[in-house]
Amino acid sequence: MDALFLDIDGTLLEHQAHPEAVRVDDDLRNLLREASRRLDGALALITGRTIAMADRLFMPLELPVAGVYGLEMRLRPGGPVEGAEEPVLLTHIADTLSGRFSAIEGIYFERKGPVLAIHLRAARDRQEEVMAAAREALRDSADYRIEAGNAGFEILPVGTAKANAILRFMETPPFAGRNPVFIGDDTADESGFDCVNGLGGLSIRVKPNGPTAARAVLPDVAAVHDWIQGLVDWIGTKE
């Protein structure tokens, strides 16, 4: 039996210029609820969003979630949330960068405790300038790294990776002993692909725009929904 791990933005939901602009419809909510039921609860969200943000999107559905790339964890619905605060260094970096760039239309700073996300989907022409400023701000720190994404980048602690969150889930019922499947769409998901490949599972990247460790590809978000529905239907034939 599979354990299913799903990224949110670009995988379950289409990217939007602002992270608060995305919406979850009842069809997707019901699909995930049924997939979780068929998998005996072995379905988790692995996301760069905070757990609070993920819960707001999918409410009233509550799932196991690794938020902020696993720096926040909720191993089971209704369980405690393990989290982390914004460190002093990142506060200084966030204040410096937002003070310089936040007035520019299309640039949005998202502070997520130990991670700072800079969204540039609506200001792609400023990406190199903002990233150069971030590199300068991090010049004397070996504790943080920059993770480039499809339309922006994030500053996060060195060693933070979705792979660590997947491994944590795989040690915990009902995920333990199952075949891991991870679907994602971004460079931040590559560590997760490597992880499930090493565990003998299935890695799937949505619409890759370059090399990927994923062993399968889906063309778009709609195809991800179809794939999950296919899994639900297939499990139904075995029950």
Image (cartoon, grey):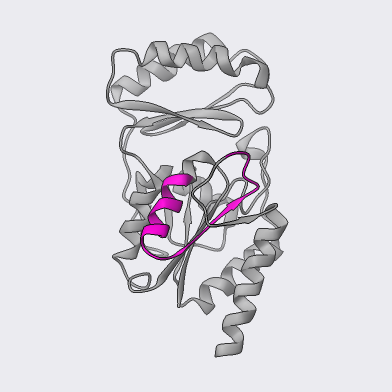
Which of 216 and 22 lies nearest the eye of the viewer? 216
Q: Quadrant of the N terminus?
A: bottom left
> Which residue occupies 60% across, 34% down?
150
- Left or right: 182 as drawn, with respect to 143: right
> Which residue occupies 44% across, 65% down?
201
Measuring from the top left, give residue 162's x and y in whole percent.
40, 48
Measuring from the top left, give residue 70's x and y in whole percent.
37, 47
> Which residue occupies 59% across, 19% down?
127
- Left or right: 52 as drawn, with respect to 174: right
Above or below 220: residue 64? below
Measuring from the top left, give residue 217's x and y in whole percent.
62, 55
Residue 48 in sight from this viewpoint: no
Q: What stretch is highlighted in magenta?
A: 190-210
- Left or right: 87 as drawn, with respect to 191: left
Residue 99 falls within the magenta-colored stretch: no
Above or below 63: residue 103? above
Which of 13 and 227 lies nearest the eye of the viewer? 227
